[in-house]
Image (spheres, rainbow, N blue to C red):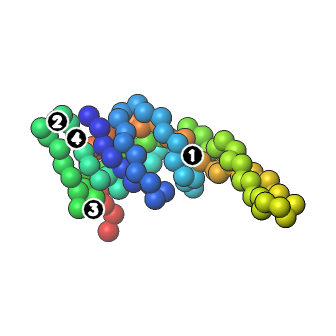
Amino acid sequence: MFAIIKTGGKQYKIKEKDIIFVEKLKNKKGDKIDIKDVLLLSNDEKNIKIGSPFIKGISVKAEVLEQKKNKKVIVFKKKRRKNYKKKNGHRQNITVLKILKIGSKSVEKK
């Protein structure tokens, strides 16, 4: 069983017990969250549900393992023959999630 979810403007193909790195979420370490933006859900090759854009009533349960920074990305700018060089680095904040359960019924609050 796998699903495709959307979080932080990106899409992730996940299975149960996967550990994924997503854009920073506001939750704390140890929090359990529901991801309701499920784009596709598949039990096997013949049973596939596709949302338009999301599948209603289905969510993915996940646990926040930690909040940390990703690897450093080097930004290097240079203009030839002008003696201009600039080196900079950037580390993006990320959240590490462990997928607990896929396809649980989500409860909509009114």
Mark 3 highlights which residue?
53
Do we see residue 3 in this rendering?
Answer: yes
Kindly report the distance in space between the C-alpha atoms of the residues bearing marks 4 and 1: 25 Å
> Is mark 2 in CB contact (under 8 Å) with mark 1?
no
Mark 2 highlights which residue?
45
Q: Amino acid at mark 1?
A: Thr
Image side of residue 93 versus residue 16, left or right: right
Which callout, 2 or 1, points to the residue nearer the camera? 2
Q: Amino acid at mark 2?
A: Glu
> Of label 4 and label 3, which has the lower sequence position?
4
What number is the disc on residue 42? 4
> Is mark 3 in CB contact (under 8 Å) with mark 1?
no
Q: Residue sitting at 44 percent across and 54 percent down? A: 10
The answer to which quarter of the image holds residue 110 is bottom left
Which callout, 2 or 4, points to the residue nearer the camera? 2
Q: Secondary structure at mark 2?
A: loop
- Circle 3 crowding by C-alpha within 10 Å: few under 14, some 14–19, many from 20: few
Task: Give the answer, above or below, for where 57 lies relative to 48.
Answer: below
Q: Amino acid at mark 4?
A: Ser
Foreground pick, 37 / 62: 37
> Of label 3 and label 1, which has the lower sequence position?
3
